[in-house]
Amino acid sequence: MAAAQTEDSMKDLLGGLLGIDNVDTLAVATHMSFPLKDQIIRALAELRADQAAFVDSLDDLLDTVKEAMDRRNVLVHNPLMLNPETNEVFSHRLKARGSLQLELKPITVDEIEQDAALIYEVGLSIIQFMNAFEIEYRYRQTPLMEPLNRRKTARAQRREAAADETCAAK
């Protein structure tokens, strides 16, 4: 949950830097991976910054966010294993980039809770950064139209209806 909140804060920062409203931000960033959000935010910040201090502050923050999300990935993507003799819990880490690497690393509930707290806190830090640098997250004021049926048959029916209306108007 903390990671979802942090990802949502990243989305808000992206939309704020683009100067688009919340609905357009959702359309752009909903399925965007965290690494892609990170890289786009860094590029936009550099393009929009009027001083290097802004970019440096954001880079420091995003480095911390990346570290926190890396910890999230360890928790989410690595199974936990229990040593039946000692009741010690291990995180089973597997890497297969270039060579196969297996690691069993002891992990405690306290470590998991600390990682979750860090992940949550960096999400709040993003919001604080936006407030400190007056990066506005705008909310759409006009209602959205109902989602269209985008299938080929529906498009053909709409075109046919529009043609009929044009003929009737003549």
Image: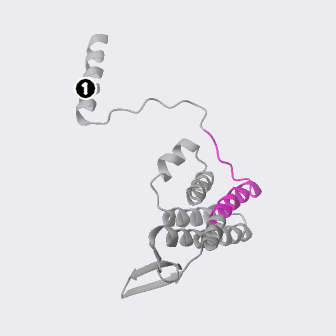
Q: Secondary structure at mark 1?
A: helix
Q: Position of residue 37 (x, y in %)?
A: 53, 61
Q: Quadrant of residue 125?
A: bottom right
Asked if residue 145 is positioned above or below residue 104 in the image, the reply reads above
Q: Position of residue 73 (x, y in %)?
A: 50, 69
- Please state which of residues 116 and 18 is positioned toward the viewer in this rendering: 116
Q: Quadrant of residue 147?
A: top left
In the figure, is residue 67 to the left or right of 151? right
Q: Residue furthest front?
A: 85
Query: Which residues, given as a range, are shown in magenta?
Result: 119-139
Q: Residue at x 69, y 58 (%)?
A: 124
Q: Residue at x 67, y 72 (%)?
A: 60
Q: Residue at x 45, y 85 (%)?
A: 103
In the picture, the quarter occupied by the N terminus is: bottom right
Q: Amino acid at mark 1?
A: Gln
Q: Looking at the image, what colour scheme do you see? A: one colour
Principal SS element in the magenta part? helix
Q: Position of residue 11 (x, y in %)?
A: 57, 54
Task: Tell me, yes or no, if residue 100 can be seen here.
Answer: yes
Asked if residue 66 is positioned above or below residue 88 in the image, the reply reads above
Whether residue 9 appears in magenta in the rendering, the answer is: no
Q: Which residue is mark 1?
A: 157
Q: Residue furthest right?
A: 132
In the picture, the quarter occupied by the C terminus is: top left
- Please state which of residues 7 and 46 is positioned toward the viewer in this rendering: 7
Whether residue 125 appears in magenta in the rendering, the answer is: yes
Q: Position of residue 96 (x, y in %)?
A: 37, 82
For the image, the number of numbered tags is 1
Q: How many other residues sit within 10 Å of disc 1, few (<14), some (14-19) or many (≥20)?
A: few
